[in-house]
Amino acid sequence: MKNRRIAVLLGVAMLAGLGLAGTKLGGRSTAANSVSQPPLAVNADSKESTGVPKHIAYGLFFGEMIALKKKATEREKQGIKSDGMRDFHKVRGKLSDYESQVLDQVASECNDKVVKINDQARATINRERARHPHGRLKDGEPLPLPPAALLQLEEQRKQTLLEAREQLRTILGQKDFDRIDNFIQQDIEARTKGSSRIRQQ
């Protein structure tokens, strides 16, 4: 079909490659470079039959953590007290100081890895866009499939997030991990309720 635009396809690829960055959670957007992992042994509970998949939940949760702490730092530099923003998840999850510190550290390290993966995904998407000036296909040209490299990067993001989750389990121990894991899952599911886009990932 002449003049078929590929913007939609690349838009979907971008969402896959960037892990739903910017998805609204309760009126708040996650950071543009939010988190989401390389293959390790991951438990069978990494996805539930109903609800938001584990890697998506952790990606959104970590992304929101990073965004709020970044905003709190900016406000504090302006002399604005931002304890409520900085401790938002600690208070909501009823976390101890130690649990909050562990969660912050794991989220930060995971986010650094995901940012690098996201940068690679953007470069791949930009190369694909350059192959089709103005987003148009040539006469008779089939709609292109998402690049294999982009799918590999999305899998890498997924594994990075699930590895971070397993790191929390190892550091905190099963009992405390279960409580925090349930909080993260329920918090994200409650604030993304009705979003079929996330549940279909």
Image (cartoon, helix red, strand yellow):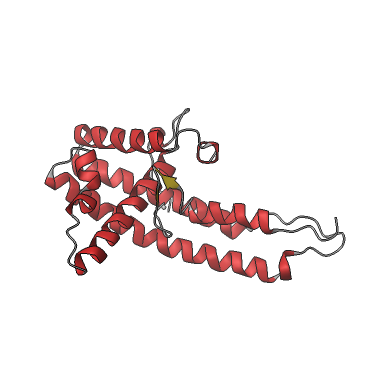
Q: Quadrant of residue 192?
A: top left
On screen, residue 149 above or below 91 = below
- The residue positioned 30% from the left and 58% from the top of the image is 109
- x%, y% of residue 47? 44, 35
Residue 46 visible in the current orientation: yes
Left or right: residue 26 compared with residue 171 = right
Nearer to us in this view, 167 or 131: 131
- x%, y% of residue 87? 20, 49
Q: Quadrant of residue 66?
A: bottom left
- The residue positioned 55% from the left and 40% from the top of the image is 197
Left or right: residue 51 compared with residue 126 = left
Q: Quadrant of the N terminus?
A: bottom right
The mark tally for this picture is: 0
- The residue positioned 42% from the left and 60% from the top of the image is 33
Nearer to us in this view, 112 or 192: 192
- x%, y% of residue 19? 48, 51
Residue 132 visible in the current orientation: no
Nearer to us in this view, 145 or 51: 51
- The residue positioned 57% from the left and 53% from the top of the image is 151
On screen, residue 197 above or below 141 = above
- x%, y% of residue 111? 35, 58
On screen, residue 129 above or below 183 = below
Left or right: residue 107 compared with residue 49 = left
On screen, residue 110 above or below 77 = above
